[in-house]
Image (cartoon, rainbow, N blue to C red):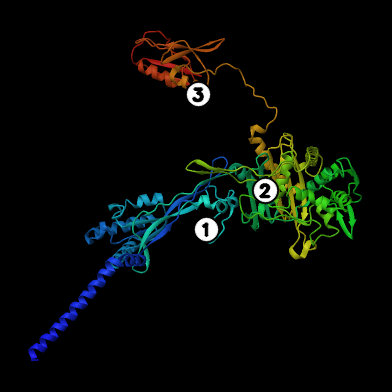
């Protein structure tokens, strides 16, 4: 083979290999483009773009009277794309950048115009596409910002990007704050209504496409979310904002006065179980109290004397005693198993069961319960278990503590337990659980669980409604209920609750004073007390029940003097403002029953007022102006017609109408007095000329 043929062979082989390689590359390119294209495109998109969740605006929470308790308002984070379409040319950007800097400086007052200008120019030089301008900007501010230089070029082309976030606000600030609750990223289970009804309030998140840019920052591709979020539903609570304000004010005032550690007050409607107000305060510093914990539902401890109502219910129901059964309280000390049960006010001698309840005798109820049930203590505790007092109330909000009510099967049950339980010790019950039991007595024995939410609405339409759950149709017989009601009323009229009495309405309730155990140190450590009062009003037709509990008061510790004033202030104010609670009040008319007198003058205005008041007046004729004639049948309005060149009759008119008619007649006026016209210097019907002076006297 000659050299030429050898060279050609090598060239052909090389060319063939190149062609084969090119074909292989082409095949692979086609494979990547058409066969595996979807896979690689998705992977590329996942590396540079992604969808993120856009939180929906949370639903509102309303009070029972329609007041807004919690709502979401939009808040914006402002960013700027320094190379947006409308400002991509240097000529456009640099012509207005200093004007924008000056406006931003004047608007936010956080940087000088020079600093803003330098920031924008530097970001432009660095090709920044997502520059942070300001956080926490409200909607009104955003509207004004869109009118600034560069930003007013267009919503998308001016470079301004507003990233919406929803901010939760409480219009009434601290009112019912703990009951309303909160939900944030750091809390897995929200607090209060916000947490309990999160599934409704939260709404449905939307989706927004974002793109990764230099520096690892994710920038929205579009100004609006690709999938719009769906707003949450609204919650209609049972809270009455005026009653809530009253409850918080009364409790805080008494907490400061008694220098207490913490306290709570709960106001509930008897028939419906709807909670109208819940206030909780914790001492932060001297004279300063804040709502930090919901003691109403989570503050479980010995209830003290307020529990005596349940003890007497069991005794009366089992016919162990009657209200007139007597007991000897002696010197106020009952010794049992080397333990002294004492009356805080000393012994009251031999008294009836009703009187012992009214004066809150510990020795009396301990003797009654121990004597009646010592051989079968389960008979006593069965009463409490039968009506489910040992169970949670299954509230609509979280945080309720399970009550601890012992029975003989408990390891901690001792010979003293039965007697101690009789007057409210060796158990753990929350203030709301005690109030619910008292509410049952006020409700003629019907035991219902409290509710905090009455309705859920979406776009104004109810989607779910709630009513109080009946725990027990009857906690005891009707006869026992009537006796307990009389005993509770006797506490206020004859016993330890006299301070809660009112000359205008009847009150029923029970004072409570309990020594609070100090953890493992028990009751022998430094003494701390809980003062409470639980009751309802009006006693003859109960509408509201109230529980007041104040822990660790330094200035006094009896329930009547510490907790009682809170109850009384709330009850007095509610009774004074609720006309429906007044009994035997008949409507009556004040003064004469004639139609109210009106000034003569323009008839249209008078007719409008009379129609609004629902009064049918007599009119002698239809006219623009009238004079009034007082008759025995009331006031009749007669037509008045003015004649050109004649003095009009303005007697009985107000000054405005009189001046109008006299001015049209060409007269000058001089006025003396106020009210309606009683005399005019030129008699009506006389001929007049323009420019004459007429004097009017008003009274």
Q: Secondary structure at mark 2?
A: strand
Residue 3 against residue 600 in the figure, above or below:
below
Quarter of the figure with the N terminus = bottom left
- Residue located farthest toward the front when viewing the structure as drawn: 1
In the orientation shown, which residue stands out farthest toward the bottom? Answer: 2
> Eyeballing the image, is 461 above or below 340?
above
In what element is the residue under mark 1?
Answer: loop
Q: Horizontally, is 136 left or right of 153 in the view?
A: right
* Residues at marks 1 and 2, CA–CA distance in whole angstroms: 27 Å
**Mark 2 or mark 3, which is nearer the start of the sequence?**
2
**Residue pictured at 56% horizontal, 56% vertical:** 190
Alpha carbon separation for disc pair 1 and 3: 51 Å
Q: Is the residue marked by circle 1 packed among few (<14), some (14-19), or many (20+) residues within 10 Å?
A: few
The CA distance from mark 3 to mark 2 is 43 Å
**Earlier residue among tags 1 and 3:** 1
Q: Which residue, given by chain and number where applicable, does mark 1 sit on? A: 184
Is any part of residue 598 visible from this angle? Answer: yes
Q: Position of residue 304 (x, y in %)?
A: 77, 52
Instruction: From the viewer's perspective, tell me whether residue 160 is left or right of residue 680.
Output: left
Checking the image for residue 265, the label placed there is 2
* Residue 602 in view in this figure: no
Please tell me which residue lies in front, 192 or 464.
Answer: 464
**432, 252: nearer the viewer:** 432
> What residue would you read off at disc 3?
612
């Amino acid at each position: 083979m000659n050299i030429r043929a050898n060279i050609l062979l090598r060239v052909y082989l090389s060319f063939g290999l190149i062609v084969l390689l090119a074909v292989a590359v082409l095949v692979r390119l086609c494979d990547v483009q058409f066969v595996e294209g979807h896979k690689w495109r998705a992977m590329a998109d996942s590396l540079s773009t992604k969808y993120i969740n856009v939180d929906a605006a949370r639903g509102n929470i309303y009070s029972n009277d329609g007041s807004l308790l919690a709502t979401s308002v939009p808040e914006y984070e402002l960013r700027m794309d320094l190379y947006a379409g409308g400002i991509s040319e240097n000529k456009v950007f640099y012509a207005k950048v200093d004007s924008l800097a000056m406006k931003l400086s004047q608007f936010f007052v956080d940087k000088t115009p020079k600093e803003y200008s330098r920031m924008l120019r530097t970001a432009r030089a660095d090709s920044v596409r997502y520059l942070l301008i300001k956080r926490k900007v409200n909607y009104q501010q955003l509207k004004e910002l869109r009118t600034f230089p560069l930003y007013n070029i267009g919503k998308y082309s001016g470079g301004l990007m507003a990233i919406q976030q929803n901010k939760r606000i409480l219009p009434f600030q601290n009112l019912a704050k703990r009951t309303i609750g909160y939900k944030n990223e750091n809390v897995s289970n929200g607090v209060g209504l916000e947490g309990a009804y999160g599934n409704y309030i939260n709404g449905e998140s939307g989706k927004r496409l974002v793109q990764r840019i230099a520096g690892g920052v994710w920038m929205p591709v579009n100004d609006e979310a690709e999938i719009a979020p769906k707003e949450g539903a609204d919650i209609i609570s049972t809270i009455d904002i005026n009653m809530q304000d009253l409850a918080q004010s009364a409790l805080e005032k008494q907490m400061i006065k008694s220098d207490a550690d913490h306290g709570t007050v709960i106001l509930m409607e008897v028939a419906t179980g709807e909670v109208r107000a819940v206030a909780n305060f914790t001492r932060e510093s001297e004279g300063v109290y804040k709502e930090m914990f919901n003691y109403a539902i989570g503050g479980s401890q010995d209830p003290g004397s307020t529990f005596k109502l349940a003890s007497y219910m069991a005794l009366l129901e089992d016919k162990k005693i009657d209200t007139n059964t007597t007991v000897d309280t002696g010197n106020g000390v009952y010794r049992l198993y080397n333990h002294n049960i004492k009356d805080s006010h000393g012994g009251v001698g031999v008294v009836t069961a009703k009187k012992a309840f009214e004066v809150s005798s510990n020795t009396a109820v301990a003797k009654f319960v121990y004597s009646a049930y010592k051989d079968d203590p389960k008979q006593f505790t069965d009463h409490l278990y039968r009506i489910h007092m040992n169970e949670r109330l299954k509230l609509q909000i979280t945080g309720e503590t399970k009550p601890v009510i012992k029975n003989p099967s408990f390891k901690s049950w001792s010979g003293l337990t039965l007697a101690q339980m009789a007057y409210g010790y060796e158990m753990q019950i929350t203030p709301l659980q005690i109030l619910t039991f008292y509410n049952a007595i006020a409700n003629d024995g019907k035991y219902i669980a409290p509710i905090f939410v009455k309705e859920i609405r979406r776009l104004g339409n109810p989607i779910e409604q709630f009513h109080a759950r009946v725990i027990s149709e009857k906690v005891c017989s009707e006869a026992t209920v009537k006796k307990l009601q009389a005993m509770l009323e006797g506490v206020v009229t004859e016993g330890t609750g006299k301070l809660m009495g009112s000359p205008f309405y009847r009150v029923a309730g029970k004072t409570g004073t309990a020594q609070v155990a100090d953890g493992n140190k028990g009751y022998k450590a430094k003494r701390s007390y809980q003062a409470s009062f639980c009751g309802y009003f009006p006693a003859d037709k109960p509408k509201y029940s109230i529980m007041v509990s104040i822990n660790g008061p330094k200035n006094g510790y009896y329930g009547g003097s510490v907790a009682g004033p809170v109850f009384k202030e709330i009850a007095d104010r509610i009774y004074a403002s609720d006309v429906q609670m007044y009994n035997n009040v008949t409507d009556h008319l004040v003064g004469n029953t004639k139609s109210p007198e009106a000034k003569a003058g323009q008839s249209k205005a008078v007719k409008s007022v009379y129609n609004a008041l629902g009064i049918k007046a007599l009119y002698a004729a239809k006219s623009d102006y009238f004079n009034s004639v007082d008759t025995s049948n009331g006031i009749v309005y007669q037509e008045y017609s003015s004649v050109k060149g004649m003095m009009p009759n303005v007697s009985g008119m107000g000054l405005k109408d009189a001046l109008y008619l006299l001015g049209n007649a060409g007269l000058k006026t001089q006025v003396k007095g106020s009210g309606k016209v009683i005399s005019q210097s030129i008699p009506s019907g006389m001929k007049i000329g323009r420019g004459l002076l007429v004097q009017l006297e008003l009274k």
